Image (cartoon, helix red, strand yellow):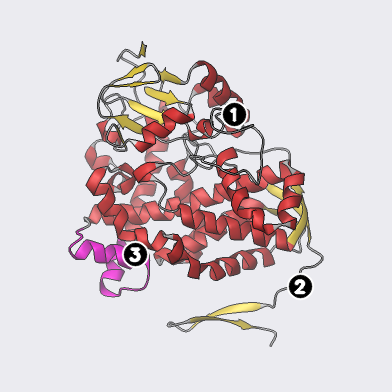
Amino acid sequence: MSSAPHREAERGGGQQTLERVPLELSTTESWLDPFDWYAEMRENHPVRYDERRRVWDVFRYADAARILSDPMTFSSDPTRATELDLPEPEARGPLFETMLTSDGSRHDRLRGVVEESFRPRSLVPRAPHIRDVADDLLDDVVDRGEMDLIADFAYPLPVVVIAELLGVPTEDRPTFKRWSDTLVETPADTSEAGLEAFARERRRVDDELRAYFEAILDDRRTDPRDDLVSDIVHAESDGETLSHEEAVGFCILLLVAGNVTTTNLLGNAVRCLTAHPDAMARLAADPTLTTTAVEEVLRYRSPVQALVRVATRDVELAGADVHTGDAVVPWLGSANRDPAVFDAPDEFRIDRTPNSHLGFGRGTHYCLGAPLARLEARIALEQLFARVTDVERASTELDPVRSAFIYGVRSFPIRYRAHPETTPRPQVETVDDGATTRRTDRNA
């Protein structure tokens, strides 16, 4: 069995320790396609200790599933780690007070505040509106013959939907993107000065987010509405007793997680399909395949590639001696390509069944927003291929999202033709009289 001695490893950069990526992912090519490295690690080093990051990296499906399914042994609370540099309590951002970093009854209490709103049955009535949002976005670009899939479609769709659910202004979405990018990306400059500058920017964004949601929470206390922020305020003020920090952190988590995952899921989906034109043709001809196609994207190019857990006791993991307080990183992107679980794992099959991927995690921390992300992705792909045809990449250069756990591209230019069988939609405008919202035909 192997064991990593607890030595004086590289220090500095505060919270950035968790946000650094392995040296093997230090090039643009490896950010975009880490899968050869995953295969090598699964074969030769399925559990390895990275002294630079002071974490155990875990690459096989069985080990990753074990970690995610055992929160008693592998905690989601990073403050339990003994070898990570974390900010002092007074300097920690509001996300430290969310279900993302909580275990046990506290996690269940926080998740229960909004869980019902994200159940599939609760989302069914929202499907027609999501379809309208998708069509509105496509109306703006379909006749151009080209667009940046991320900027024009994959980002605005989920951020509009989650902003409406929360009850925050959708016109603030450029600011939401800046905040989200800062919170999920890793520092490009890992020098001491670069890390300090990154930490300052992170603190500035934390302060801006806190101020933004504190104002909205205060408004909902006196003027509750039918939205998630009002639900969070209600849980804070009645017997559920959310603290102020928990309420602010909850809003931030829902805003960021509610758009980042789906944006990259959609971007990764079209990246997969343009690389596999036969699959794209099948999907366009048979939209009933969209559900399994989304699941295959979640496996093949999962928008979340890694998670972090902390060992709460000494434990053996695939022959390695993991000690209490050690940070453990299960690489979901590697587990989802494990040939011990998936037949021909490096093949992209839009009809793959069964498909027991870990794209949304597993266990008590299974992604709360998974039903919404699946619904948005399915509707978005259905509407996209109903409106355009002959979709192809318009650039050979891709700029990866530089994150320790989120996987995707910042931009994805595509060319296409407007579908010849598509009837132009009527020009419509949204009229909001303060009580109801209706759509009217401007040409009527």
Q: Which residue is under mark 1?
A: 35
Amino acid of disc 1: Phe
Taking the spot 38% from the left edge, 32% from the top edge, the residue there is: 66
| Mark 1 vs 2, N-terminal side | 1
Q: Which residue is under mark 3?
A: 229
Front position in the image: 376 or 248: 376
Amino acid of disc 2: Thr
Amino acid of disc 3: Val
Tell me where the magenta segment starts and ends, as one range: 214-241
| Mark 2 vs 3, N-terminal side | 3
Q: Main secondary structure of the magenta part?
A: helix
> Quadrant of the image for the C terminus?
bottom right
Mark 2–mark 3 distance (CA, rounded to whole Å): 38 Å
Pick out the residue farthest to the front.
Answer: 354
Residue 73, position in %: x, y?
28, 31
Residue 105, position in %: x, y?
23, 47
Q: Quadrant of residue 284?
A: bottom right
Instruction: State yes or no: discs 1 and 2 in contact (Cβ < 8 Å).
Output: no
Residue 421, position in %: x, y?
80, 67
- Mark 1 is surrounded, within 10 Å at the Cα level, by few (under 14), some (14 to 19) or many (20 or more) other residues, namely some
Instruction: State yes or no: discs 2 and 3 in contact (Cβ < 8 Å).
Output: no
Mark 1–mark 2 distance (CA, rounded to whole Å): 41 Å
Q: Which disc, if any, is residue 423?
A: 2
Can the viewer see residue 20 in this picture? no
Residue 110, position in %: x, y?
28, 53
Q: Look at discs 3 and 1 and give the one toward the viewer.
A: 1
Inspect the magenta stretch and tell me whether residue 248 lies in it. no
The secondary element bearing badge 3 is classed as helix
